[in-house]
């Protein structure tokens, strides 16, 4: 039997509807202060319809648009829950999309992209700075750490 749209949902129903595991919903609860399901005796969670819509928007931004947790937190802080809820309505989730569904319009705001690193050619016009003593030791240590991290990220293939 189908529940009414205004009915409260359990965590298992929400997880199934959004196609995410229950532990992800609990995790999002800790990361997004706007997600506040009602808790009954014994800690059982009941999600209101507006909680479900907000979670649908969060899911869309994270999985569909490629935002990070911090990115979605910033959107919630700067643009509010209404924006995130609407983002979730722009594109239906896979199990909600019918076979005859038309593709959703392009999102209003694309995920921020990181610019490529600058070329590694030497910069000859920069003024020289002479480091002495502890400053030189500190920067040498930082450089060693960065090279070690680079080695880990490239799998030891430094080029």
Image (cartoon, grey):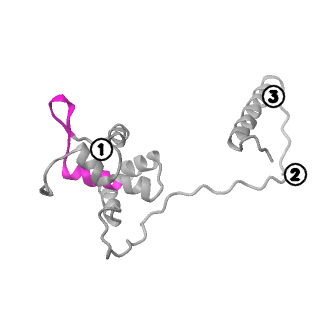
**Magenta-span inclusion, residue 77:** no
How dense is the environment of label 2, judged by Cα within 10 Å: few (below 14), some, or many (20 and up)?
few
Q: Residue furthest front?
A: 1
- In the rendered image, residue 98, in percent from the top left (x then y), is placed at 30, 70
Based on the displayed image, in which of its 4 quarters is residue 90 positioned?
A: bottom left
Callout 2 secondary element? loop
Query: What residue is disc 2 on?
Result: 124
How dense is the environment of label 1, judged by Cα within 10 Å: few (below 14), some, or many (20 and up)?
some
The answer to whether mark 2 and mark 3 are in CB contact below 8 A is no
Checking the image for residue 2, the label placed there is none
The answer to whether mark 1 and mark 2 are in CB contact below 8 A is no
- Decide which of tag 2 and tag 3 comes sooner along the chain: 2
The span picked out in magenta is: 38-57
What main secondary structure does the magenta stretch of the protein show? Answer: helix
Rounded to the nearest whole Å, what is the CA distance between mark 1 and mark 2? 51 Å
Rounded to the nearest whole Å, what is the CA distance between mark 2 and mark 3? 21 Å
In the picture, the quarter occupied by the N terminus is: bottom left
Which marked residue is nearer to the observer: mark 1 or mark 2? 1
Callout 1 secondary element? loop
Is 12 placed left or right of 74 in the picture?
Answer: left
- In the rendered image, residue 35, in percent from the top left (x then y), is placed at 29, 44
Residue sitting at 76 percent across and 28 percent down?
141
Residue in front for this viewpoint, 98 or 5? 98
Query: What residue is disc 1 on?
Result: 34
- Decide which of tag 3 and tag 1 comes sooner along the chain: 1
Is 20 placed left or right of 159 in the picture?
Answer: left
Residue sitting at 29 percent across and 63 percent down?
96
Which marked residue is nearer to the observer: mark 3 or mark 1? 1
Checking the image for residue 136, the label placed there is 3
Residue in front for this viewpoint, 86 or 12? 12
Callout 3 secondary element? helix
How dense is the environment of label 3, judged by Cα within 10 Å: few (below 14), some, or many (20 and up)?
few
């Amino acid at each position: 039997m189908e529940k009414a749209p205004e009915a409260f949902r359990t965590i298992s129903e929400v997880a199934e509807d959004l196609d995410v595991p229950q532990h992800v919903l609990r995790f999002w609860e800790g990361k997004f202060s706007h997600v506040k399901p009602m808790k009954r005796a014994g800690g059982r969670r009941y999600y209101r319809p507006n909680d479900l819509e907000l979670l649908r928007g969060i899911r869309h931004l994270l999985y569909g648009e490629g935002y990070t947790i911090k990115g979605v937190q910033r959107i919630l802080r700067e643009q509010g829950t209404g924006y995130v809820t609407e983002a979730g309505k722009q594109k239906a989730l896979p199990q909600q999309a019918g076979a005859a569904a038309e593709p959703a319009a392009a999102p209003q705001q694309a995920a921020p992209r990181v610019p490529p690193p600058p070329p590694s050619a030497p910069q000859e016009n920069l003024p020289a700075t002479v480091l002495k003593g502890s400053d030189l030791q500190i920067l040498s240590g930082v450089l060693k750490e960065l090279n070690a991290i680079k080695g880990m990220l490239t799998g030891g293939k430094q080029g």
